[in-house]
Amino acid sequence: MRVKYSDLKNKRVFITGGGSGIGASIVEHFCEQGSEVYFVDIDLKETKKLLNKIKKNKFRSPTFSECNLLDINKLEKTIKNIITKKGPIHVLVNNAANDDRHTTDQVDEKYWENRMAVNLKHYFFAAKAVVKSMMKMNAGSIVNLSSVSWMLGEGDKVVYETAKSAVVGLTRSFAQEYGKYNIRTNSVVPGSIATERQIKHWLTPKYKKLILDSQALKRQLKPNDVAQMVMFLASDQSSGCTKQSFIVDGGIT
Ligand SMILES: NC(=O)c1ccc[n+]([C@@H]2O[C@H](COP(=O)([O-])OP(=O)(O)OC[C@H]3O[C@@H](n4cnc5c(N)ncnc54)[C@H](O)[C@@H]3O)[C@@H](O)[C@H]2O)c1
């Protein structure tokens, strides 16, 4: 058992993009804490692998629903259904995103809208969908995944980076609006995290060397480095933290 947050036991948690990568580690961590976990994704193959792993580890089983987050109506219905049948959601983790590379030249209006929809729009609507149930409890924690890429200005995915900086704006505004109901909203801002997708597409030996040369810590960060921060922000141990960004980047910024 990693750090045990006793207050997370039986907490109702909703996670987007929980089927693989950092989201899968977040799902796993909450299941290990004994939370009541619900997650959505579109990748059924990776989700199946995750569900098997959780079962093998004998953690509490999560509930999975297939939901494309581009379909806001379906996302809202999925969340409403949980609240109606099970009760209020205590923790929301807005995690799903897609960091496909693109140059400014390649971006037309349709692609801009698609990137904003996959990297930003559903964060707002998921938060809106859970917040009333949190207000009734006078408690709640919302964690939004951003990225250091917009701080570094990496220059190879401009719309993604624009959306990821907006996640921080969304976090701060939401935290201020709902702080009076004791709802905390924070951003977690990862650096380079070795997920399957990063390893497959971008983490070449050359890029990895560049990362390690730039980081203060000389090791490649993994999904659990981020999940650990999410556990802290979800738990009452961070009761005084809201409206903030928590960077998990091994000191690259
Ligand atoms: N991995 C990194 O190095 C890194 C760095 C900085 C920030 N982040 C952020 O961390 C979060 C997780 O990133 P990751 O690297 O684990 O990503 P990933 O691509 O490995 O996983 C994302 C998950 O979201 C799901 N998803 C994507 N689009 C979806 C949609 N339309 N509907 C439903 N599910 C969808 C995918 O199927 C996948 O399971 C993201 O917000 C990302 O911006 C990651």
Image (tube, grey):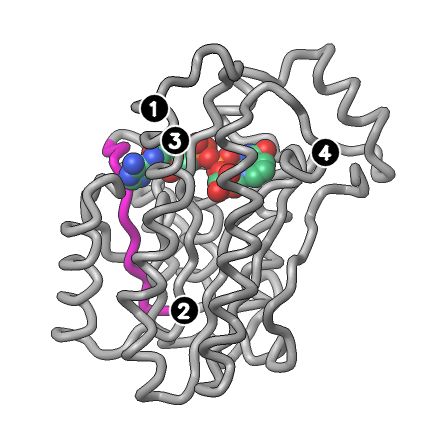
Instruction: Determine which residue is flagged by label 2.
Output: 91
Question: Where the C terminus falls, by quadrant?
Answer: top right
Could you tell me which residue is drawn at 18 percent across and 67 percent down? 82
In this rendered view, identify the residue nearer to me: 81 or 223.
Answer: 81
Amino acid found under the numbered disc labelled 4: Leu
**Closer to the N terminus: mark 3 or mark 1?**
1
Instruction: Determine which residue is flagged by label 4.
Output: 152
Residue 49 visible? The answer is: no
Q: Residues within 10 Å of mark 4 (few under 14, many from 20)?
A: few
Amino acid found under the numbered disc labelled 1: Glu
Q: What's the distance in space between the residues labelled 4 and 3, CA to CA?
A: 19 Å
**Residue 167: x, y in percent?**
51, 50
Q: Nearer the viewer, mark 2 or mark 1?
A: 1
Q: Is label 2 in contact with label 1 (beta carbons under 8 Å)?
A: no
Q: What's the distance in space between the residues labelled 4 and 1, CA to CA?
A: 25 Å
**Closer to the N terminus: mark 3 or mark 2?**
2
In the rendered image of this protein, does residue 146 appear above or below residue 79? Answer: above
Instruction: Determine which residue is flagged by label 3.
Output: 115
Could you say whether the residue bearing mark 4 is in a helix, strand or loop?
A: helix
Q: What's the distance in space between the residues labelled 4 and 2, CA to CA?
A: 29 Å
Amino acid found under the numbered disc labelled 2: Val
Q: What's the distance in space between the residues labelled 3 and 1, CA to CA?
A: 10 Å
In this rendered view, identify the residue nearer to me: 110 or 19.
Answer: 110
**Closer to the N terminus: mark 4 or mark 3?**
3
Horizontal side of 189 relative to 132 (left or right) equals right
Q: Quadrant of residue 244?
A: bottom right
Q: Residues within 10 Å of mark 3 (few under 14, many from 20)?
A: many
Could you say whether the residue bearing mark 2 is in a helix, strand or loop?
A: strand
